[in-house]
Amino acid sequence: MIDPHDRRMEITVLDPHLPATEVVVRTVRPADADALTRLYQALSPESRRRRFLGTASFGSDAARRCCAPDHRHSEGFVAEVRGGPRDGALVGHLELEETDDGAIELAIAVADRYQHRGIGRQLVAAGLVWARAHHIGRITATAFADNAALLGLLRRELPTLRVRDLMDGTVEMDGTVEVETDDLP
Ligand SMILES: CC(C)(COP(=O)(O)OP(=O)(O)OC[C@H]1O[C@@H](n2cnc3c(N)ncnc32)[C@H](O)[C@@H]1OP(=O)(O)O)[C@@H](O)C(=O)NCCC(=O)NCCS
């Protein structure tokens, strides 16, 4: 089923043996749990280390939890391949979870072969649309201090982003969700 709110994007994958592939960013569904587990299992050790800050693994319980957000205090978006030999594979995931102080914490991963193609940006853009619709004023994320990809991505999407050094090799990023001019009465 095609959701009218799906954000569609065309990308060309790095693998020259695969045809140009369409990737769609959409809200996560319970039926995505197995595909999401496969996405995380296939991440390179370095991407997994950056996503989970070195520690946690991602099993089927975590996948089921991520695929059943309550859409109010938690949400998820996935990037799904449409067409070609990898039709239906998930190649990106954005997790959004409300924190105790009313902000939304963001965590994100894009499959290694699909990085640097704008998928991370599309996922974050989808998350920001959701945050605005739910009147969420702040987005936070924690990452290794040398995570140039996430820092670059969030700096561009959240111009007010502040970065606080947690002195343990990680930084906490915190940005205001700007109201779009279109949202104003
Ligand atoms: C962070 C991550 C999700 C970015 O996804 P992506 O799909 O590669 O990002 P995009 O292609 O949308 O890039 C968007 C912007 O991010 C920045 N960016 C991406 N990769 C970058 C890199 N290696 N160095 C510097 N900036 C980078 C750029 O500003 C880029 O803008 P540009 O297109 O003008 O260059 C991806 O690198 C990833 O999955 N990393 C492993 C997991 C992780 O680190 N998660 C964050 C902690 S929760």
Image: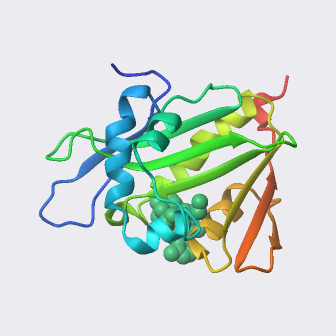
Q: Nearer the viewer, residue 67 or 156?
A: 67
Instruction: Choose top left, top right, bottom left or bottom right for residue 13.
Output: bottom left
Q: What residue lies at 43% left-to-right and 66% top-to-bottom?
A: 116
Marker count (numbered)? 0
Image location of residue 41, percent across then percent down: 34, 57
The colour style of the image is: rainbow
Q: What residue lies at 41% left-to-right and 64% top-to-bottom?
A: 115
Q: What residue lies at 44% left-to-right and 74% top-to-bottom?
A: 46
* Relative vertical location of residue 106 with respect to residue 155 in this rendering, above or below: above
Q: Looking at the rendering, in which quadrant would you find the C terminus? A: top right
Image location of residue 118, percent across then percent down: 46, 57
In the shown orientation, is residue 170 left or right of residue 161? left
Q: Looking at the rendering, in which quadrant would you find the N terminus? A: top left
* Relative vertical location of residue 114 with respect to residue 2 in this rendering, above or below: below
Instruction: Choose top left, top right, bottom left or bottom right for residue 148.
Output: bottom right
In the shown orientation, is residue 162 left or right of residue 129? right
Instruction: Choose top left, top right, bottom left or bottom right for residue 178.
Output: top right
* Relative vertical location of residue 150 with respect to residue 9 in this rendering, above or below: below
Q: What residue lies at 26% left-to-right and 38% top-to-bottom?
A: 88
Image location of residue 73, percent across then percent down: 71, 31
